[in-house]
Image (cartoon, helix red, strand yellow):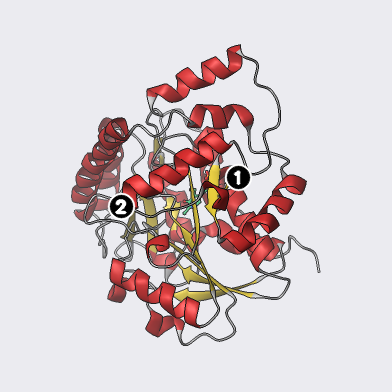
């Protein structure tokens, strides 16, 4: 079968392309931080450029950076991780590829929530893995629970995201612990996408590593650290899997981007990162309040930088609705259908990755257009 036949476009990237047709577009579509990385990142990059550090690093990445990441787990969660269990990857996107390649064979079943981040399923299709979609909704605050997972058989790996894209909900420690334990008891690999950790505004996020050393954790520099263009992520694996990851990484990527790794050595500036988090928190408060006047929002986001809004008052086709909004008032939003098929035609996703003035202009245009309909 043609490998690409089931792979769908990453719709948000299509929206971004279409949005660029208009000079005055308001951007709610893409989840790319507009904030600056911690200042030392640029300093370290400049130093690396001056020193012409233009060589491959080892396939798992610079040991100094892996040590800093290990320290991050101790500082933030009091979890003790050996740097030898950490591999740096080309974005977290590269980490999914590694995880799926080393854990899953052709035909194996990977459980994903519906809705969830679109690329997981498309990676699965590319690798001939079978994605199994488990619907989640507001009844569990968009958390997958063990009760639901139990209905699905022959699952080889489960992937969850917390805080999530597209909803912004955060798994409670209790739900996460139960999931991790269930997976361990039933020989299911537990993959935790923690890329939005750090951007949590209510409560506290937990890493799956707090509950089991067997958890496979994926994170990266694109969101909390505001470094999307550096294309740098990481994966933490149980010791016995790291060699497999290394072999894949040597062959597929040779090494993670060298200059980016040197820059990332300056990324762990918690004081600065806290300021950035508070900025996104302010934006969340603003946008949540304003959008609640126009749409029904069934889960106030606790983290990440998204709002998942119900559009049933206006339409039951999120794709057409987003297109109409873009064409008429030049406001770019992502249709829910990008994230799955569980009721997603009734939802759209807003990203608050622009300043409040920009968000305000978008809200004003939406109010004027929708409330006079
Ligand atoms: C849940 C989630 N995981 C992974 C990624 C990919 O991030 P990266 O830039 O690290 O490849 C994104 C990007 O939006 C995301 O939302």
Callout 2–callout 1 Cβ contact below 8 Å: no
Please give the count of numbered marks on the rendered protein.
Answer: 2
> In which quadrant of the rendered image does the N terminus lie?
bottom right
**Quadrant (top left, top right, bottom left, bottom right) of the C terminus:** bottom left
Crowd tier of the residue under label 2, counting other residues whose Cα lies within 10 Å: few below 14, some 14–19, many 20 or above: many
Q: Residues within 10 Å of mark 1 (few under 14, many from 20)?
A: many
- Comparing 352 with 259, the one in front is 259
- In the image, what residue occupies the spot 54% across and 76% down? 188
Q: Residue 119 sits in which quadrant?
A: bottom right
Q: Which mark is residue 303?
A: 2
Examine the rendered structure and indicate whether residue 189 appears above or below residue 22. Answer: below
In the rendered structure, find residue 219 and report the number of the disc placed on it.
Answer: none
Question: Please, is residue 204 above or below residue 69 in the view?
Answer: below
Q: Residue furthest top?
A: 50
Q: Is residue 204 left or right of residue 70?
A: left
Q: Evaluate whether residue 122 shows in this view.
A: no
Q: Position of residue 321 (x, y in %)?
A: 42, 56
Say left or right for 172 vs 345.
Answer: left
Q: Earlier in the sequence, mark 2 or mark 1?
A: 1
Secondary structure, mark 1, is strand
Q: Is residue 127 visible?
A: yes
Position of residue 80 measured from the top left corner of the image (x, y, whole percent): 41, 53
- Residue drawn at x 28%, y 40% is 277
Residue at image x 53%, y 21%? 45
Above/below status of 293 relative to 21? below
Residue 132: percent from left, percent from top? 56, 75
Question: Residue 89 shows which numbered tag?
Answer: 1
Furthest residue to the right?
1
Q: Nearer the viewer, residue 372 or 96?
A: 96
Question: Is the CB–ligand 1 distance for label 2 below 8 Å?
Answer: no
Alpha-carbon span between mark 2 and mark 1: 24 Å
């Amino acid at each position: 079968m043609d490998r690409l036949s089931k792979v769908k476009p990453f719709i948000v990237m299509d929206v971004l392309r279409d949005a660029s047709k208009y000079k005055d577009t308001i951007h709610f579509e893409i989840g790319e931080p507009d904030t600056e990385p911690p200042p030392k990142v640029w300093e370290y990059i400049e130093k690396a450029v001056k020193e012409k550090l233009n060589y491959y690093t080892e396939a798992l990445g610079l040991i100094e950076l892996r040590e800093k990441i290990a320290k991050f787990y101790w500082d933030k969660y009091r979890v003790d991780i050996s740097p030898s269990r950490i591999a740096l990857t080309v974005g977290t996107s590269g980490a999914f590829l590694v995880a799926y390649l080393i854990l899953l064979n052709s035909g194996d079943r990977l459980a994903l929530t519906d809705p969830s981040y679109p690329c997981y399923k498309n990676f699965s299709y590319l690798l001939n893995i079978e994605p199994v979609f488990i619907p989640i909704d507001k009844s569990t605050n968009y958390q997958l629970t063990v009760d639901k997972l139990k209905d699905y058989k022959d699952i080889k790996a489960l992937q969850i995201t917390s805080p999530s894209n597209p909803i912004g909900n955060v798994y409670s420690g209790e739900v996460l612990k139960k999931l991790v334990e269930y997976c361990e008891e039933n020989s299911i690999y537990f993959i935790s996408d923690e890329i939005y950790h750090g951007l949590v505004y209510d409560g506290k996020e937990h890493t799956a590593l707090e509950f089991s050393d067997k958890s496979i954790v994926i994170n990266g520099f694109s969101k909390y650290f505001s470094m999307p263009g550096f294309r740098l992520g990481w994966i933490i694996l149980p010791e016995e899997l790291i060699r497999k990851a290394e072999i894949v990484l040597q062959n597929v990527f040779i090494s993670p981007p060298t200059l980016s790794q040197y820059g990332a050595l300056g990324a762990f500036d918690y004081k600065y990162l806290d300021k950035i988090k508070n900025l996104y928190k302010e934006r969340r408060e603003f946008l949540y309040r304003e959008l609640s006047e126009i749409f029904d929002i069934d889960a106030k986001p606790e983290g990440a930088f998204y709002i998942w809004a119900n559009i049933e008052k206006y339409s039951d086709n999120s794709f057409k609705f987003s297109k109409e909004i873009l064409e008429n008032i030049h406001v770019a939003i992502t249709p829910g259908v990008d994230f799955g098929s569980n009721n997603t035609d009734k939802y759209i996703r807003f990203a608050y990755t622009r300043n409040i003035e920009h968000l305000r202009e978008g809200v004003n245009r939406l109010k004027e257009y929708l409330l006079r309909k």
